[in-house]
Amino acid sequence: MKRSSLVLGAALCAASNALADCEPWPGEPSPLPAVSSSDDLTARFAHLRAEELAALALQLEPLAPGDAHRVWLHVACLDPQRDDAREGAERTSPVRVHTPEVVHQPGEVVPAAADLAFAFGHLDDPISVVLATRGADASAKPRATTSALASPTVRPQPRAAPSESPLVADGLLDEAEGLVRQAHFEEALEKATKAREAVPPTGDPAALGKRRARADLIAGTAQVALGQDADARASFERAIKTDPSLRLDRASTSPKVVRAFDAARAAASGGAP
């Protein structure tokens, strides 16, 4: 389990200098404190919290750069003057995929001159794919042009994965965890349920069991946040029965989640809740 600030973490903050949208994460005071506060206690809290999250972000960078990026942005909310927060957010910033529109043309399109400056200024122009007309040579290949480049490569789209696949389940689990970190608990619960259903019935029993247990653990965490204590305990009990080795990091997990999880383990082992 990741730190509680991520397990029950909340909304994304604005990057670097645009801090007006900063919102407190669960367990933090509202409004979110800042080191520039005139109140010494509030400023001290912001400083210590920023130090704690900066250390966490550095640990997350090689393992989960997307999570590290969110943490660095929150550090910048607490202390906008921290250079390492700005640098960390830039270092872990998600890669933008450039995907211009592809449009079909009935006849030949004459490309513009391949000027480098012009090309970079028109990256978002649609890619025109010329369709062969009736009576044309069947062996001729379609020509693709843009307003700046004569023949860009049009690659086929990958086939969709089967509805029941470990990879599909893993993707849904990652999405569910991300929704929990953004405090979208109802959506996270729905996504975790779909992830459990997507785990295939056949395969490596241990690996598939760990996926089901992970789905139930995410669902239970979301249910705790939603105040659905009975459902959360049932989800945790199912996760523990599926994967008896399942453990929480008590130093970084919300006490409320730990209490619900411990009660579920006691019930699953036949002990008193």
Image: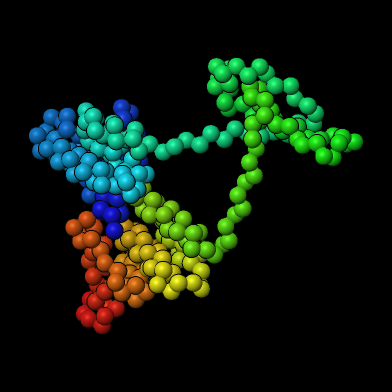
- State which quadrant residue 44 falls in: top left
Foreground of the two, 89 or 41: 89
Q: In this view, which residue lies farthest toward the right?
A: 135
- State which quadrant residue 162 falls in: bottom right
| Residue ID at (67%, 18%) | 112
- Residue 182 location, x and y as percent? 36, 48
Q: Is residue 84 left or right of residue 202?
A: left
Vertical arrangement, residue 217 with respect to residue 9, above or below: below
- Residue 93 location, x and y as percent? 38, 36
| Residue ID at (57%, 26%) | 123
| Residue ID at (67%, 25%) | 150
- Residue 220 location, x and y as percent? 34, 64
- Residue 60 location, x and y as percent? 29, 47
Q: Is residue 117 left or right of residue 103?
A: left
| Residue ID at (58%, 27%) | 124
User: Can residue 204 be seen here?
Assistant: yes
Q: Is residue 49 left or right of residue 151?
A: left
> Which quadrant: the C terminus?
bottom left
